[in-house]
Amino acid sequence: MPVTEALGTIGRVLVRCLTAAAGAGLLSAASVGAQEAVLELPIRPFNVDVMLRQQTFAPDDREIGVQLGITALRYGNVEVRTIYQYFSIHSQEFKTDQHSVFLNPRWNNFIDILDFPKHTPISRLIRHALFGPLEDRAVPYIGALAGGVLPGPGNRAPGHLIGGQVGVRFPVAQSLSVDISVQYSQYGVDFRGEAGQAQQWVFLTGVRF
């Protein structure tokens, strides 16, 4: 076989090998991207929060309660939690227990949408101003609340509950994070036989594991 012909054959084989390798690389990258974007049903992490509440109506005062939840869905930086919230008030005049169950979709690291300009991203400046030396570990988030509360208006069906939240999560160890947030919600509730609409601010601090 002439040298020119042999070199041509070798060149064609090399081109085919490189093309196959490039194709395999693209398929691998696509596979990794698909894995990152896949919808998960993780159940974990669990969260346990202690709450301090200020509300109007039923009654208009401050109470302490507890909130439990699981992460039901996750897709990239978006997660949906299922939450059970409980408040109990005991006094000489009355006793009332309030139970709420709601969904809590969250957008984690929402600040990163401001990742511009290239040299001094706004998101980095905000993180540094808010979290200082913990800026690379903090996971800020915003979320919504939607569900129901018992006892509902008229002490019959559950009352509606809608609201929003803002907070931050700090990973402190493997599979353990400290979560701090503020929630605002409006809901229909029955209090001592009277139906009404309550508004509440809740400060929460707890752990996710």
Image (tube, grey):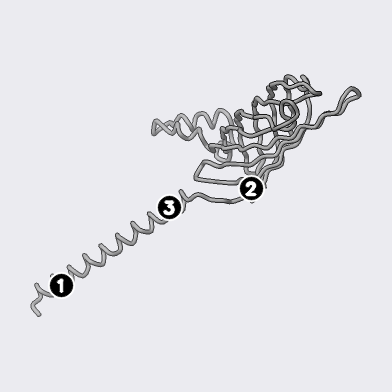
- Looking at the image, which residue is at 72% across and 26% down? 153
Q: Which residue is mark 2?
A: 45
Tell me which corner region of the image, top left, top right, bottom left or bottom right, holds residue 155: top right
Give the foreground label among 1 and 3.
Answer: 3
Q: Which corner quadrant holds the N terminus?
A: bottom left
Looking at the rendered structure, the secondary structure element under dot 3 is helix
From the viewer's perspective, is 77 left or right of 47?
A: left
Give the camera-side residue of 188 and 131: 188
Mark 1 and mark 3: Cα distance apart in space: 38 Å
In primary-sequence order, the first of circles 1 and 3 is 1
The amino acid at mark 1 is Thr
Give the foreground label among 2 and 1.
Answer: 2
Name the spot of residue 154 as percent of width and height, x first. Answer: 74, 26
Looking at the rendered structure, the secondary structure element under dot 2 is strand
- Looking at the image, which residue is at 69% across and 28% down? 202
Count of numbered marks: 3
- Sort mark 3 into few (<14), some (14-19) or many (20+) by Cα contacts within 10 Å: few
Q: Which residue is mark 1?
A: 9
Looking at the rendered structure, the secondary structure element under dot 1 is helix
- Looking at the image, which residue is at 54% across and 46% down? 74
From the viewer's perspective, is 109 left or right of 183?
A: left
Q: Which residue is mark 3?
A: 34
From the viewer's perspective, is 113 left or right of 15?
A: right
Name the spot of residue 25 as percent of width and height, x first. Answer: 34, 59
In primary-sequence order, the first of circles 2 and 3 is 3
Tell me which corner region of the image, top left, top right, bottom left or bottom right, holds residue 81: top right
Tell me which corner region of the image, top left, top right, bottom left or bottom right, holds residue 69: top right
